[in-house]
Image (cartoon, rainbow, N blue to C red):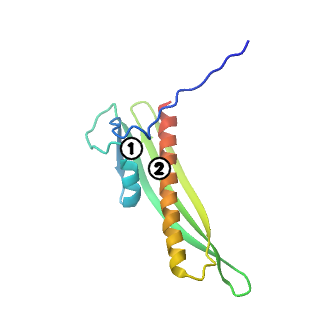
Amino acid sequence: MFAVSSCSYKQLALNANNENYVVYYDDSIPDSLKRTIAITFDNSKLEDKNKTRIYLKNFNSSIYNIYAGSSLRSLEGEISAVIQLEIVNELKTKNKNIKIMKRHNSGELNPFAEKETIKTLQKIIDNEIYNQILLEVGLFEM
């Protein structure tokens, strides 16, 4: 005899008008990340004990260059972002630090191309933070 079991998967990303959540930001959260998160979660400030509160705070982004070679120039760059996530409802609380790191080749002869690469990687990092928040909220609700 075989038995198949599965867990319910709640798709938060597709429900753009989700009113069960209230998101709070501190001043360190960039506007680009706020706009991305606002796509899914209702940002109404109406207090309700039944709503799950999501606190995003202490965002920190840094760029680190790795120097090597005979001319000691930057060969690689590393962009990292850290954000603190706290999810609270009336029954439980979850705290999580989310850290995303990306590396890029900085041996470009064109400094403008390197700047565009950094901008693109920062957008990718914002999307990965957003996906990680969706995952954590989904796991919190299970």
At a point 49% along the width and 63% down the height, the residue shown is 122
Query: Is 7 left or right of 1, judged from the image as shown?
Result: left
At a point 36% along the width and 46% down the height, the residue shown is 23
Q: Most extreme residue toward the bottom, as rendered?
A: 71
Q: Position of residue 93 (x, y in %)?
A: 46, 37
Estimate how packed mark 2 is, as few (under 14), some (14 to 19) or many (20 or more) residues with alpha carbons within 10 Å. Answer: some
**Residue 26: quadrant of the picture:** bottom left
Type of amino acid at the residue the image marks with label 2: Tyr
At a point 27% along the width and 38% down the height, the residue shown is 47
Q: Which residue is mark 2?
A: 130
Estimate how packed mark 1 is, as few (under 14), some (14 to 19) or many (20 or more) residues with alpha carbons within 10 Å. Answer: some
Q: Position of residue 131 (x, y in %)?
A: 50, 47
Residue 135's place in the image compared with 58, above or below, is above
Whole-Å distance between the Cαs marked 2 and 1? Answer: 10 Å
Q: Earlier in the sequence, mark 2 or mark 1?
A: 1
**Residue 77: quadrant of the picture:** bottom right
Can the viewer see residue 43?
A: yes
Give whichever of 140, 41 is nearer the camera: 41
Residue at disc 2, secondary structure:
helix
Q: Position of residue 73 (x, y in %)?
A: 65, 83
Type of amino acid at the residue the image marks with label 1: Thr
Q: Position of residue 34 (x, y in %)?
A: 37, 54
Query: Is 23 left or right of 13, judged from the image as shown?
Result: left
Residue 35's place in the image compared with 94, above or below, is below
Q: Are marks 2 and 1 in contact (CB under 8 Å)?
A: yes
Say the numbered circle drawn on residue 69.
Answer: none
Q: Which residue is mark 1?
A: 40
Can the viewer see residue 29?
A: no
Residue 77's place in the image compared with 35, above or below, is below
Give whichever of 110, 35 is nearer the camera: 110
Residue at disc 1, secondary structure:
loop
